[in-house]
Image: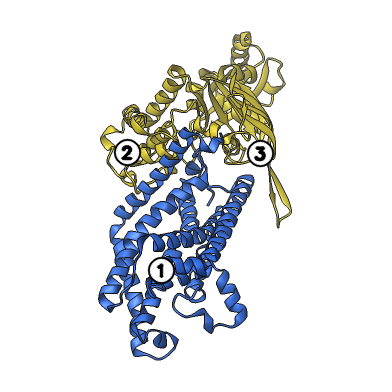
Amino acid sequence: MSRWLRPERIVNITYVLYGEVLREFITLRRYFIESISGLVMVYILFMGFFLAGRGFSGQIASQAANSTDLAHQAVGFILWLFALNSVGHFSSAVRDESHIGVMEQIALSPSGLIVDMCGRAIGKTIIDCIMIGLVLITIMLTTGISLSLPAFSVGFVFVLTLLGLYGLGFFFGGLALIYKRLGSVTMVVRFGFLILTGAITPIENFPSWLQLICKTLPMTEGLKILRLLMVEKRPFSFIMESGDLLVLAVNSTVYITVGLISFRYLEKIARHKGLLGVY
Amino acid sequence: MYSIELRNLTKEFRYLFKKQRLIAVEDVSLDIKKGEILGLLGPNGAGKTTIVKMICGLIRPTCGQVLINGQRLEKDRSHALTRIGAVLEGSRNSLWSMTVIQNLTYFGYLKHVHGHVLKERCDALLDLFQLEHKRDDLVKNLSKGMKQKLAIALAFINDPDLVLLDEPTLGLDVHGARLVKECIVRLAKQENKTVLMTTHQMDVVEEICDRVAIINQGRLIALDSAEKLCSAFGREYYEVRLKGRFDTSFLKTLPIFRDVEVIHSDAEKAESLIRLVMDREDCLFEAIEFLRGDGVRILSMTKVEPNLEDIFVKMVEA
């Protein structure tokens, strides 16, 4: 039996994951006011788009002209919020922990940094689901849009999309082990996602070469499918038959695989250069 | 079997754009027995922390090997880490936004300790490091000494066989330092844990370490017990307070004095303090008679035993 599949190892890894989830919740509770004000800010930002759509001219305005378009935007905006957190979560964790001095202590975990980061991803996703879910409900109540939420299909597509996003997160996390401060780089990528994945504006309006790039980004295909499921209320079988799910699966697998491999490689370089934990 | 074996350990850092290289550790070989406390001494930048980080796998050696309980670290780092505890950043080793017990629980999970074993370890460590009354306090509200004690407690959360402590008593008050020293000795001698500690505090090393390794410019320049190092490399001397200013040049030519040095000269009081290193111990009276014969008034004479600090300074300067 592979040493990774030994029962005691699985139990140990489960506790590492549990420890990280616990820590995410403790941090949330400790900085609750900040988290809540972040949500309010996010809601105001969305409503800004919404009101801009109602009151001003431009592309966003034409998009938000009816409820379906607004629903499209709401789904795009919500998924982008998840992308915002998942892409930069590891790199900011590495930077902060190197700064405060616990990075090396965490790197001494026998399970390794990747397992530890996976624990954080799970904890962060659970918290994001609760917090961003609250934003979504508020948006639905205040704008009158209705969204379908078939738990299995939406959950499945959502997790698959997040895998790809965390793949990118692992890549930036690995870079942060060496370069530490990548805040502005990840910010460019994260805000680029708002435009380039079709979250607020359709990518069909872009030149064909840019469309090609946009389609390879980890959020684009997931967002397209989620809109079909939640806004246009298409059945899951339709998604399966169209081949979109396969494209998403391949895309996410590539991103998470490349992300994990690059993280491991960059961690090795950091150990070689003695940079792990050095700020 | 040795708890730690370092075999020709070398670490070289290369700076890509500067075309420079720095040899932080060069060909260091040493063994540490189970239950032994080894003090790693060296000036700043000597390579002590790099050695400690290579032992726990945070830095990969350029060449050479680290063996933990006879097993190569690189072969199964994950298993080795279950047996290692380390304090690398002193009081910064814990999460300040969490409470003491939350820190112990979190790092316990990270190091594969859980269930009732974790609860028992937490209680035992809180008791051992006298942190029980601070159990639910946020770490950021603790004093520096308490943070340091918590950092050491965290290193012991997985009940390791091998503990690596980088400056464990740094910044502690007398009481805190004593407690930490007692805990280290108790864990090493009663629970047979191996301790490798780096420090600049020679008194701590003399007091609790079984052996001392002195590192300078990445090289191991001495390895023995503090006592043996003192007797091998040190020589007792006398500090003599004399009336009047004193010219040592003549004394230096006499065969009974190995070395004569004016430590201090006070023109107002017309006193001098000189250091006399005798060639042989039985030369003392001969020296006194010589000084008195030369008309020198001796006010006091104190025998000074060499300590580790003297040896350390001497070796590093050499």
Are both tags, 3 and 2, on one chain? Answer: yes
User: B268 or A264, which is in the foreground?
Assistant: A264
Which quarter of the figure has residue A11? top left
Badge 3 marks a residue whose secondary structure is: loop
Q: Which residue is mark 3?
A: B61
Q: Residue at x 50, y 57 (%)?
A: A91
Q: Colour of chain A?
A: blue
Task: Specify few, some or many for label 2: CA neighbours under 10 Å numbering under 14, 14-19, or 20 or more.
Answer: many
Examine the image and state in which quarter residue B153 appears: top left
Q: Residue at x 56, y 21 (%)?
A: B211
Quadrant location of the N terminus of chain A?
A: top right
In the current view of this chain or complex, which residue is farthest to the right? Answer: B19
Q: Residue furthest bottom?
A: A57
Tag 3, which chain? Answer: B
Q: Amino acid at mark 1?
A: Pro
Whole-percent x, y for residue B103 in the image: 36, 41
